[in-house]
Amino acid sequence: MADGTAPSGTMRLSGWGRVPTATVRAHRPERLRTVGAAVTGAGARGIIAYGAGRSYGDAALNSEQGVLLMERLDRYLAFDTETGLLRCEGGVALADIIATFLPRGWFLPVTPGTKFCTVGACVACDVHGKNHHHDGSLGNFVRSLTLLLPGGETVCCSRKQNSELFYATVGGMGLTGIILEVELQLRPVETAWIVVDYVRTRDLDDTLNTFHERDADYLYSVAWLDCVAQGRGFGRGVLMFGRHAGAGELPNAQRQNPFGIPRKRDKKLPLDVPEFVLNPLSLRVFNNLYYATHPARDSVLVDYNTYFYPLDSILQWNRAYGKRGFVQWQCVLPYENGVKSLEDILRTAQQRRAYPFLSVLKRMGESSGGMLSFPMPGYTIALDFSVRRGLFEVLDELDKEALVQILTKPKNAISRQYQRLFEFENVRLRFTDDALEAVAVMAMERKLGARGLRMILEDLMLDLIYYLPSNKKIREFVVTKEMVLNQKINLGLLEKAG
Ligand SMILES: Cc1cc2nc3c(=O)[nH]c(=O)nc-3n(C[C@H](O)[C@H](O)[C@H](O)COP(=O)(O)OP(=O)(O)OC[C@H]3O[C@@H](n4cnc5c(N)ncnc54)[C@H](O)[C@@H]3O)c2cc1C
């Protein structure tokens, strides 16, 4: 059956990185009304929505269990031509929204670097684009959602109605239910063109300074980083600042048709590129070439596909990484220590000879409020690595490094919050380096990322916070690795010491 009430069959699926793969029981509903039966009949391990499979890892997989393919749930439900408010089903592709509404003067308010993904998934991932420093993530433009809960109940949620559910769903990676419908505010534009200023930078300092000085002036900003260059060129890059072109900025010939762009023939990678092709030497050659061919230029008119979706021009480009697939590693580093943290991370990767094929740096602004949303103010770096032996150990190391930075460096870092709290009791609080690392590793093991750091420290420190006011003799307290691993501070021993 293809109506979604029964699985249409088992199939092997993966995300865009092609690793991992999973055999799943796939449901492909044709109509919203049949989705409920597929969800309630899914069994204990439930069912997860699968959009277009353009997220990299296993986010949309549910091994041996139910997966709900959203591809047929792709209808427009309402559009207000005055305000640009669109209501559509969750399986509508961003590429279709652009094709339908750009000729009418409306573009996506936020877009990831591919248009071949679905709007429901983009809400579930609370995707960010090149305008995060300016506008935040997609969640900021979602007026309301219709959500199908695991029990089969359909709920409407927004900032005012069922707001907790709304904020848990925006960035909730599909874990609160299936996003059936999205009400999304589109952005008015006058043309399909972007005015781009290209800036080539000498090294990491130059890259970050240029970003810092200039990106407030542009709606869009992004940097390509050369992560293979060492020595003086370490961290050099090409920054691309952009804004939507006004109709008056187009050459005369294009003004007649401001939403028309040149048609390009789709290219397709016909086979998996052998793994040996991507090696440090070929990456160095590629990076040198990219750097050399992107000199500083101002006010270049570029069509929206070239600016936002350069990789989409080659279909199945993920095959370039070979049969073993690839992973994307991404983090946000708070601004306070951004330069140093980024440098540490890039150097660790280089020292371990893990060279990303693609490295993209952006600046992020405030979070959308999504409880599990990824963005927060800081630099975000995304590194694409082809899978090879030992890669995951290197990535664990990068995770640990980034989490320790988050734990300690921002002005309002969690460890600093505790230190300030203890100062009220005239107690100097210290964390040993290996204690901080242990907290980071624990957050990684629990698959909680940065959000797990607070939870772990709160569990550990709770008893102590109540204990200290009653014991005035303690002047200094050191949190050790052992305490973190045991998740306990032995107050009995403190009593004796006190
Ligand atoms: C070239 C490229 C560039 C990218 N650039 C960016 C970027 O700049 N910023 C960024 O944030 N991301 C970026 N991404 C990641 C990608 O755009 C997002 O993850 C996007 O949401 C994937 O959409 P999808 O339809 O393919 O979803 P899938 O990969 O199929 O699913 C992603 C997640 O959404 C959930 N989901 C899917 N549909 C629904 C639904 N209807 N209801 C509830 N949950 C659902 C899934 O369960 C899964 O957890 C990029 C990806 C690629 C390939």
Image: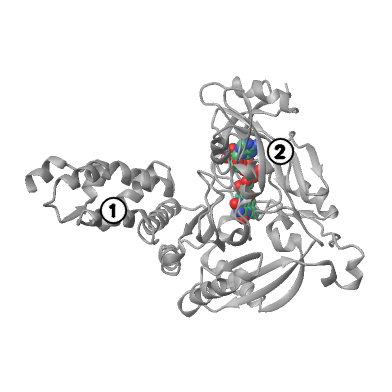
Q: Which mark is residue 421?
A: 1
Say which of marks 2 and 1 sits in front: 1
Q: Give the CA distance from mark 2 to mark 1.
A: 47 Å
Task: Say which amino acid is labelled 2.
Answer: Gly
* Residue 68, image quadrant: top right
Query: For the image shown, how many numbered marks are present on the structure?
Result: 2
Q: Where's residue 307, x and y in %?
A: 71, 63
Residue at 66% in and 79% down: 296
Rendered position, 399 above or below 250: above
Q: Where's residue 253, x and y in %?
A: 91, 70
* Residue 486, image quadrant: top left
The residue tagged with tag 2: helix, strand or loop?
loop
Q: Where's residue 103, x and y in %?
A: 85, 54
Q: Quadrant of ligand 1?
A: top right
Image-based side of 115 in relation to 132, left or right: right
Image-based side of 206 in relation to 190, left or right: left
Q: Where's residue 64, x and y in %?
A: 55, 28
Q: Earlier in the sequence, mark 2 or mark 1?
A: 2
Image-based side of 55 in relation to 263, left or right: left
The residue tagged with tag 1: helix, strand or loop?
helix
Residue wearing tag 2: 91
Q: Residues within 10 Å of mark 2 (few under 14, many from 20)?
A: many
Rendered position, 361 above or below 440: below
Residue at 40% in and 66% down: 344
